Structure formats: structure tokens, C-alpha cells
Image (cartoon, helix red, strand yellow):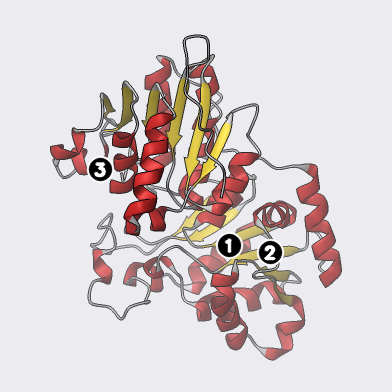
Amino acid sequence: MATLPFTRRDQNTKKKLLLIKLEGLGDFIIFLPSLLKYREVFPGYEISLLVDNKINYEIANRYKGENVDNVILFDAKKFSKNIFYRFALSKKFYQMNFDTVINPIYYRRKISDFIVRATQATEKISFAGYEVEKLGRIFLLDPYTKLIRTPTTISNEFYRHKHLIEELAGKTFDDYSTTFPSKDSDIAGARKILSEYGIAQGAFVVIFPGAGRAVSKWPVDKFAKIAEHLVEHNFDVVICGSAMEKNLAEGILQHVDKSKMDHIFNLTAKTNIFSTAGIIRLAKFYIGNDSGPTHLAEAVGATVICPLGLGHFKEFYPSQDTEKNIVVSVKNMDCLNDAYACANGLTTGSPAPCVSNISTEAVINEIKKLI
């Protein structure tokens, strides 16, 4: 747990800006191009970034110094459940004497609004957001001195962030693009891992079968068919993921023809975020659900194939290059942008029909174009 930079500002010290980013990996990666602009938009400010995700904390620390001054990690679950922890941390947020607090989250959370209230900042900024723009719930306006509305023509999260930072800057950014803080050591670490497993560099494909929600997970038996097809075309297959994806990886392996197992490598829980980024960069291409690692793959410049459900269709992925970031989806279903309401009534843990109905043939057709 990081120590909060607990100092009170006087007239001779810098003004203070707090950015609150309490979201998962994918959302955080989408936000990174904006993070690189805040120093320019708020020159002379001491910039602090608050996160509640350890992986995001590791990523953010690579920007420490040049783009942010302080990266603060806190326990959001404990903050929600433990009143004593909440009171103590809220008191510190107040005493840190921020001048400006920005909560750049379109789908705002009560916990981040609470933290905004806890500060004594004179300027409190956020998106008007989903609750206000789509549902008309204006009671959420209370903590903020300025809410920035997203034009109805903007429905992708990447461009929402671009709009917000440009509104704050009063200008457009022509150099605004996906990014990730890669280092040469990430590639070196990735090469070492690949060498240890005997995986030929450039002749393998990464599969990531996980996703933040079960409704977004393409079935493991279909990933297995894709893995078999790749092996038949002389590719090794590398399955990546955290410990949470171990069961999914094992599910893929259970469905794979045993004669092809020597060319499929399960690296779940054997890499960190940076070595994973390196492995993806060295791969021929990447296949994965709408998930954090898929946004990572896009950010590091990989060619990506994503079996994408219709619940938030193209709202989060892809961000920019639609030729390099390939979406495979079902057609002629009535659930477009229904927030996966089509999954209501399904067994817990099941994918939405608009995900499970994506055929392996459709994905293989895209693979054929690449190989």
C-alpha cells in the first residue's frame, strides 16, 4: 500500500491536482493517452493519480516523474466496507489540500464521487456521464463544480476521454493515440520466457480467453478449435492470463486434439503485465475477448482479432485502427448495445448469446486473411 503524500500546501508551493481512476485494466489503458496530456493542461501543478488496482498501480508508476508526481494505491473494498478506514482515508484526502480534483470516468462509481466530496478542492470536474446523459439522474451533479457532456456522436470510450481532455485544454490534440509504457526490458523478459518454453519467436499466436464478465467470454471449446487450426498452419499457440484464467486455459486444453498439444503452451499466471505486453508484441497476432489484455494488445501495436458481443458494441474496443483491430460479431440479433440484457435468465457464468453464437468459422476466416 502506497503512503499518501500527506502535506498541506502553503502559498509558495505548487497547486495540486488529483486524478481519480478507479477502474479495471482495460479502462485504465484506454485512459492512458489522456494521462500523458494532464501535465500540459495543468502546467506547474503537482499531479497525483489515485488507483485501486495493483496492476494499474504498476503501470502508472512507469509514468511517475514525467507525467505524474504521486501514484496512490488504496483498497476500494475496504474503503466501502470498513467505516474506520473510510473515515481515516477521507480525512487524509481532505488534508492533502487539492486545488482541483478530476474524476474522468463516464460510468461513474459512488465510491469515486464520495472521494471527490471528501476533498476540499475548489474545482471538481467529471463527465456528466451515463447516469446523467442516458438516464437523466441529475442527483449525481452534487459533488462537482463542472460536468463535461459528451456529444451524442461520441460513443467510444477512447474518444470520450479525448473529448474531455480537449475540453479542459481548450484545443484539439492531433497526436492523441493509444499507448503503453513499454521498455526494452519487457521484450528481453518476453524473449527469455519464450526461449525457456522453446517457442519460436514470430511464429506463435497469443490467445487470451478471459474477460472481466462471464457474458463476454467466448466459449473455451471454440478457442480450442482456433488453437487447433493455428497448429495445423504451423503456429505455436501461447495461452496467456492471470491465475484467474487458469481454469479457462485448462478448459481449452481439455478440448484440444492430443496430437496438437506439443504446440500449445499454457503461460497463465507465469507472466506479469509487462512481460505479457512483450510477448504480445513478439506474436504474429493476438486473439481475445473484450478484456484488459485485448486493450493492451491494441496499445502495444499488435494485430488483434476479438470475438465481440453486442452488449456494448464497439464502445470500448477497438479504439482506432479498425483494420488492424478486427472485430468478429454475430449479425441479425436484436440486442445491439443492450448492456447484455440478452444474458438475463442465463445460468450464472454463461456467455451472452451474442457472444456464444459467434462461430469458429467466422474467426478462422479472419485468421486466413492474416496468414
At label 1, which amino acid type do we have?
Answer: Ile
Q: Residues within 10 Å of mark 3 (few under 14, many from 20)?
A: some
In the picture shown, does residue 12 fall above or below 261?
above
Q: In this figure, which residue is indicated by the disc labeled 1?
A: 287
Q: Are marks 1 and 2 in contact (CB under 8 Å)?
A: yes
Task: Judge left or right: residue 133 versus residue 3.
Answer: left
Task: Judge left or right: residue 35 versus residue 185.
Answer: left
Q: Nearer the viewer, residue 113 or 316?
A: 113
Task: Judge left or right: residue 64 versus residue 23.
Answer: right
Provide residue 127's location: percent of width, then percent of height. 31, 33
Sequence-earlier tag: 1 or 2? 2
Mark 1 lies on a secondary structure that is strand
Disc 1/disc 3 C-alpha distance (Å): 30 Å
Disc 1/disc 2 C-alpha distance (Å): 8 Å
At a point 33% along the width and 70% down the height, the residue shown is: 352
Q: Nearer the viewer, residue 285 or 269?
A: 269
The answer to whether residue 324 is seen in the rendering is: no
At label 2, which amino acid type do we have?
Answer: Val
Provide residue 43's location: percent of width, then percent of height. 53, 14
At a point 59% along the width and 41% down the height, the residue shown is: 60
At a point 46% along the width and 47% down the height, the residue shown is: 27
Q: In this figure, which residue is indicated by the disc labeled 2?
A: 205
* Residue 9: mark in rendering: none
Task: Judge left or right: residue 223 versus residue 161.
Answer: right
In the picture shown, does residue 193 fall above or below 174?
below
Sequence-earlier tag: 1 or 3? 3
Q: Residues within 10 Å of mark 2 (few under 14, many from 20)?
A: many
Between circles 2 and 3, the one closer to the viewer is: 3
Mark 2 lies on a secondary structure that is strand
Between circles 1 and 3, the one closer to the viewer is: 3
At label 3, which amino acid type do we have?
Answer: Tyr
Q: In this figure, which residue is indicated by the disc labeled 3?
A: 130
